[in-house]
Amino acid sequence: MNLFEKMENSSPTLPERYKNRSKEELETIIRRVKKTMGAQLFLPGHHYQKDEVIQFADVRGDSLKLAQLSASQHEAEAIVFCGVHFMAETADILTREDQHVYLPDMRAGCSMADMANLTQTEKAWKKLMGIFNNTILPLTYVNSTAAIKAFVGKHGGATVTSSNAAGMIEWALSQKERIMFLPDQHLGRNTAYDLGIPLEQMAVWDPIQEELLHEVPVEEVKVILWKGHCSVHENFTVPNVEQVRKDYPNMNIIVHPECSREVVALSDYAGSTNYIINQIENAPPGSAWAIGTEMNLVNRIIHEHPEQHIISLNPRMCPCLTMNRIDLPHLVWSLETLAEGKPQNLIKVDPEIAADAKKALERMLARA
């Protein structure tokens, strides 16, 4: 049973009365609570949220930006985070003690973050230390649990985002001979390759088999990639790229670096969510784009830019299923119980874990 299955079994479930309300009634309640609570309430929304939810967000953004903005809201006592669990954890780590973070549905997790747990990571670290001695610095994508961020912080490493991964890997390799990159192998591989590190010098740690997969002698390995991935971005394939090239020869292909190395190599552009959004916003009218990222965001970009021809790189792509668990009924439940003084689904990171996780975040932010 993984982390989010445990949450699903132990968390309060949505009361029936919220399931039967109309969309109009739910929206009316949200507007009323937001108006009543005013600046005491802050509602950040991740780019991948449904339109029905994101319309009520005080700000849109990626996970780290939203956590930082939550911490900057000096009047906000309650942060209702419309995202997934690891994002709400990061917000709790960065906000003040008198601020409280809530997640409308505790089942809103992240399959990638769930691919690296603390037990697995500690076992891997022990074995890798036996192979490489004290020559590894750990880095973790912010798309990871607080426990993994804390492990990295405790061992001198830092977090990274898809925007700053290159700079953080360069920093890490200035500190130690090699790095271990958690939990997304694709972001680690794509970034390291762009920095000039040959693919053969990248090994993969398989946490299930507890073995290191490598092509060269271990002393030549520079990057150890955790065998994890984003279930959404891994569904963009080489045949998807080939089909777009065939159907739309002049179309630009832009993808997120959580896509596989093969897909990124065949694309015209690759970058973070904000990079993708900015590229489309700054593109000339009439330009054509196939976007390889989460479908809620792609559909929103299509709607907001009718002057351009935009499609999904994979026409059969579904939205992120765990992110989609935040819906109007859950958001209303969260806000209404909060207004009644009986809030649900408080996110509270253990203070010791939070302290070490904050070290990893601060090392990254110091180099921003």
Image (spheres, rainbow, N blue to C red):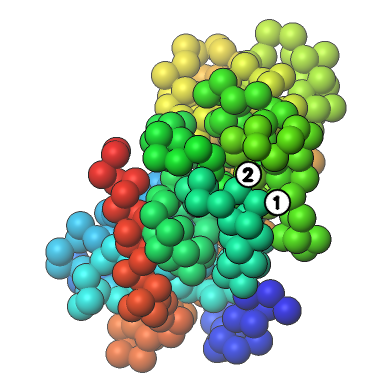
Give left or right: position of 34 versus 23: left
Give left or right: position of 354 versus 272: left
Q: Residue at x 52, y 59 (%)?
A: 144
- Residue 269 or residue 154, whichever sits in front: 154
Q: Residue at x 77, y 55 (%)?
A: 211
Q: Residue furthest left?
A: 75
Disc nearer the start of the sequence (1/2): 1
| Amino acid marked by disc 1 | Trp
> SS at mark 2?
strand
Q: Is residue 105 above or below residue 254?
A: below
Residue 111 seen in the current view: no
Residue 236 sits in quarter: top right
Q: Is residue 97 above or below residue 253?
A: below
Q: Residues within 10 Å of mark 2 (few under 14, many from 20)?
A: many
- Residue 86 or residue 11, whichever sits in front: 86
- Residue 283 or residue 261, whichever sits in front: 261
Residue 360 seen in the current view: yes
- To which residue does mark 2 refer? 224
